[in-house]
Amino acid sequence: MKCQKNGFCVVRDDITVLEDAIRNAEFLIFSTPTRWGNISALMLKCFERLFGFLIQEVRQGFPKKMNANGKKAILVTSCSTPFPFNIIFNQSSACFSRLKEICNYSGIKVIKTIVLPGTLEMQEVPQKYFEKAEKVGKAYFSCL
């Protein structure tokens, strides 16, 4: 629990790049493939390393929101399960649930989710998903 006392991961490697990026960002985009209805192991490890940086546990009550409090985020996932089964079998929605929980405790407001289902045999991303991402970007970023 040393990271909780320090407010950052005790292993000071490339995690500092992520800490700086989160601290300086106005907007966050978290993207991960859906793995068995969850976030990827790499994304989970990243959030585990950011534990003390994002929240500070308190004796009683909810954790204190730290360095990302008040930021906004878009969540993106891909899922090999085709639509509508990615929803029916709680694949994409469970992945988003994990990300939303992390965001909630960190004080990050999720403003949009984007999912690309049915990637198992997909050779390339269909154009409509690029158009959807562009539409979301234009709705939230005035520079686009």
Image (cartoon, rainbow, N blue to C red):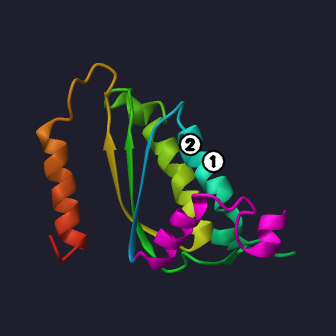
Please, is residue 109 above or below residue 49 in the view?
below
Q: As shown in the figure, which amino acid type bears the numbered disc 2?
A: Leu
Residue drawn at x 46%, y 76% as measured from the top left = 71
Is 28 left or right of 6, judged from the image as shown?
A: left
Q: As shown in the figure, which amino acid type bears the numbered disc 1?
A: Lys
Asked if residue 3 lies in the magenta stretch, the reply is yes
Please, is residue 16 above or below residue 32 in the view?
below
x and y percentages locating residue 83 in the rendered image: 31, 31
Residue that lies at the very extreme toward the front in this rendered image: 13
Asked if residue 33 lies in the magenta stretch, the reply is no
Q: Quadrant of the N terminus?
A: bottom right
Is 19 left or right of 134, judged from the image as shown?
A: right
x and y percentages locating residue 23 in the rendered image: 51, 76
Instruction: Find residue 42 and name its label.
Output: 2
Q: Secondary structure at mark 2?
A: helix
Residue that lies at the very extreme toward the top in this rendered image: 121
Of 30 and 132, the residue lying toward us = 30
Residue drawn at x 31%, y 28% as measured from the top left = 118
Residue drawn at x 22%, y 64% as measured from the top left = 137
Magenta portion: prevailing SS class: helix
Instruction: Find residue 45 and name its label.
Output: 1
The residue stretch that appears in magenta: 1-25
Please, is residue 47 above or below residue 45 in the view?
below
Of 110 and 6, the residue lying toward us = 6
Q: Secondary structure at mark 1?
A: helix
Q: Quadrant of the C terminus?
A: bottom left
Q: Measure how far apart labels 2 and 1 are at the Cα level.
A: 5 Å
